[in-house]
Amino acid sequence: YLPTINDVVLAKLGQQVNAETPMTRHSIFQVLGSALYYNPQLELAELEKRGCTQQVMTQWMKDVDSMEKWLTKKMTVLGLLSVLRLPASSLPQSVVSMIPNIISTAVSLSIKMKEELQAGHKDDDDGAIEADADDDDDWGGYDEDQDVTNPDDEAYMTALNKLSQGGDIADFLLGDGWDGLDEDDDEDFHSPLDNVDEMHFVNDILKEAYKREPDVYQQIQGALPPETVASCQQIFASVDAQRQPGGGN
């Protein structure tokens, strides 16, 4: 689905790039963040194929200050930093030159999210959906006499086709038009992303990148603003303390 998703959302982004209200762009960046987190190599290839990587990344980071929804912020942190899971030598040069800005944006946003959470300002309608503690049944696959066609996938593609014909991306992301989906699934649905702590993600991605390419990231560290370096150290210390026995989750 990745090429189709990019065809749709990037066309929408082109229409909305100069819009005064950034809500649709925020929804688009949420989708792109999910794609980068899912597979940064494939998603970057899709952006490069369309010659829009630098423009998308630049607009994305420009719009960060106007983001209000928790999920949009979270997918921005996860998506942008997922680029650093790839060796710097495999990245487009335009992305390599933006790594200091990517780190600064993701680090400052994750710190802001932590402060909002501690202050109780996380929006309730955009939080993670908790898994049912009693729902521990594993899916065992299809029986021989079952139809292997997935109605959820069919409903998704129907909604995606509707979007490509001019539908609103915000409605798409909210599930409008997904008529084939079982309503009961909404109550039980949870995503693996619900369990991803953005502060831990920032900590792990930056440390892994530095360990993998110390010379490259030593140079990148030298290009970071002092406040970003200080924030990184704050995140490292906080995560290390949490991971100590008795340090909390």
Image (tube, helix red, strand yellow):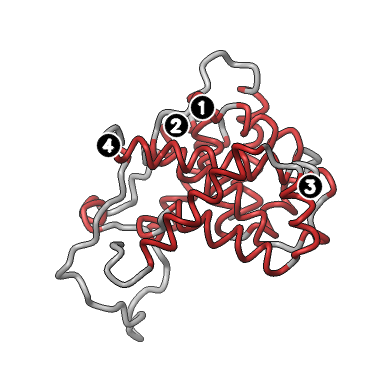
**Mark 4 neighbour density, 10 Å: few (under 14) some (14–19) many (20 or more):** few
- The mark lying in front, picked from 3 and 2, is 3
Answer with mark 1 or mark 4, whichever residue precedes in sequence: 1
Question: How many angstroms separate mark 3 from mark 1 (CA)?
Answer: 22 Å
* Residue at disc 1, secondary structure: helix
Mark 1: amino acid: Thr
Question: How many angstroms separate mark 3 from mark 4 (CA)?
Answer: 34 Å
Residue ID for mark 2 = 170
Is residue 100 toward the left or the right of residue 131 in the image?
right
Pointer 3 with pointer 2, Cβ within 8 A: no
Pointer 3 with pointer 1, Cβ within 8 A: no
Looking at the image, the residue that sits furthest to the top is 20
Say which of 49 and 106 sits in front: 106
- In the rendered image, the quadrant that contains the C terminus is bottom left
Q: Which residue corresponds to the image point at 60% horizontal and 41% vertical from the top-left?
A: 228
* 123 to 74, vertically: above or below: above
Pointer 2 with pointer 1, Cβ within 8 A: yes
Please state the total of marks drawn on the protein image: 4
Question: How many angstroms separate mark 4 from mark 2 (CA)?
Answer: 15 Å
Looking at the image, the residue that sits furthest to the left is 134
Residue ID for mark 4 = 125
| The quadrant where residue 195 appears | bottom left
Mark 2: amino acid: Ala
* Residue at disc 2, secondary structure: helix
* Residue at disc 4, secondary structure: helix
Mark 3: amino acid: Glu
Answer with mark 3 or mark 4, whichever residue precedes in sequence: 3
Residue 43 x/y as whole percent: 67, 53
Answer with mark 3 or mark 1, whichever residue precedes in sequence: 1
Is residue 6 toward the left or the right of residue 120 in the image?
right
